[in-house]
Amino acid sequence: MSADVDTGGSESGPVPALFDRATACADRLRAADRVLLASHIDADGLTSAAIASRALERAGLCFETIFEKQLDRAAVERIARSDYDTVLFTDFGSGQLDVITEFEGEFTPVIADHHQPANAETEYHLNPLLEGIDGASELSGAGASYVLARALGGERNRDLAGLAVVGAVGDMQDGDGGLSGANEGIVREGVDAGVLSEETDLLLYGRQTRPLPKLLEYASEARIPGISNDEAGAVSFLSDLELDLKRDGEWRHWVDLTGEERKTLVNALMRYAISRGVPAERINALVGTTYVLTDETPGTELRDVSEFSTLLNATARYERADVGLSVCLGDRGPALDQARQLLRNHRRNLSEGLQWVKTEGVTVEENVQWFDAESRIRETIVGIVAGMAVGSSGVRHDRPIIAFADAGNGEVKVSARGSHALVRRGLDLSVVMREASQAVGGDGGGHDVAAGATIPAGAREEFVARADRLVGEQL
């Protein structure tokens, strides 16, 4: 149960429970001659870095930005050798506090994170979990960075709220009711600042950029027989509607439709889903809360928060975090072009990876299911593929899925994905990944519903056995 959170946004910031911690962190940064900003590389990490770098810049502070795929001991040692007295960690650091604190004589850490803290303490630590706020569902790393930015620069940094929402959605913190908890205060500030719009709309990915048949065909969220993964079925459904859904022979996009046209299409889609036996909860989840970045051009990936987060993921997972950061900071030229090319490549790799899992199948244990992609799926995307595979033929909904992929240097990357239904029954994959990996000489962590680890090559069987037992004890 999370603490009560005042989401009004006031002199005590968008998340009053974190005001004192944010103020202390901001004061320490102001006192620094220069700052090293170190951040994670996923969508949440990139938006965290963008928010923090903009806030540091506006505060007149000298800083350098670096990205780490994993904040392990080697990475912390590199940071300690960098000759910076103050290091700001965003979207990681809490889970590695036991290692970071060993180097506190060499630099002062300032941490804005939302992951489960390790068993150690440091003075400048901004994390919602320390105040009883759920870091897996109520505040992301970007949200923590935004709270820090507001403490550092006050009201003028409210325009960064849009990026914080991109980070939260990229971290899968939104349900069909939208963002909740501490995130609501950030949403409200973004709306008040005029950079964000909160709307009730169709909850299918690609409303801005996909032609209508593709929007429906690729709607894995809906899983409507005869439409989902069925190009001819999607075209047939749309053609039967008494709507003019083409312009100059080309299919229109959702964003091009009028309010009445959208209403007609949604009602028809719901009737069709009912006729095909889709469960009521999936039908109700077709419509919900969405977020639009009002300063971005309609019909682009950047307009819709969900599409923006996917674009960022595509840069980071192919070692181009610099490109994603540039897009976050406003580059709409070369960086955006590069990001779009990386996104096309990312989608192709996800499709091929998902097809491989469907073909090869998974191994089902008593409490978990798993597959080992070895080098066939990149270790930076194997977790996404695992999540996408759940519900496909032979992959079960009722137990978490664990994916393995070669990480090089004698190491294996492990990614685990669960469901909110399993979390409600007691699943906490951050504990499973940390304890099972440490038992075999690795390390890991994350969130209750999604977590990861790195283990030595050859330790897979023992890791699976330990993870299976831990999940069984939790459930």
Image (spheres, rainbow, N blue to C red):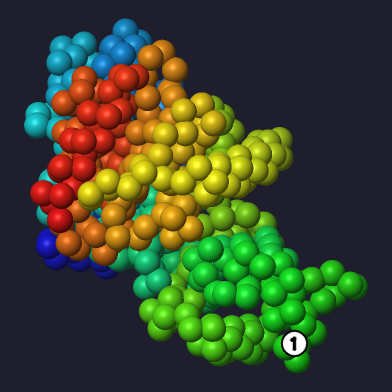
The image shows residue 12, relative to residue 221, as above or below, that is above
- Image point (47%, 80%), residue name: 278
Mark 1 closeness class: few <14, some 14–19, many ≥20 residues within 10 Å: few
SS for callout 1: loop
In the rendered image, residue 415, in percent from the top left (x then y), is placed at 36, 38
Asked if residue 121 lies left or right of residue 408, the reply is left
Q: Which residue is mark 1?
A: 240
| Res 117 → quadrant | top left
Q: Position of residue 220 (x, y in %)?
A: 53, 63
The one of 231 and 298 positioned closer to us in this rendering: 231
The residue depicted at 9 percent of the width and 31 percent of the height is: 119
Indicate the quadrant containing the N terminus: top left, top right, bottom left or bottom right. bottom left
Q: State the residue in front, 77 or 459.
A: 459
Which corner quadrant holds the C terminus? Answer: bottom left
Quadrant housing residue 104: top left
Q: Does the rendering let one see residue 363?
A: yes
Q: Name the amino acid type tagged 1.
A: Asp
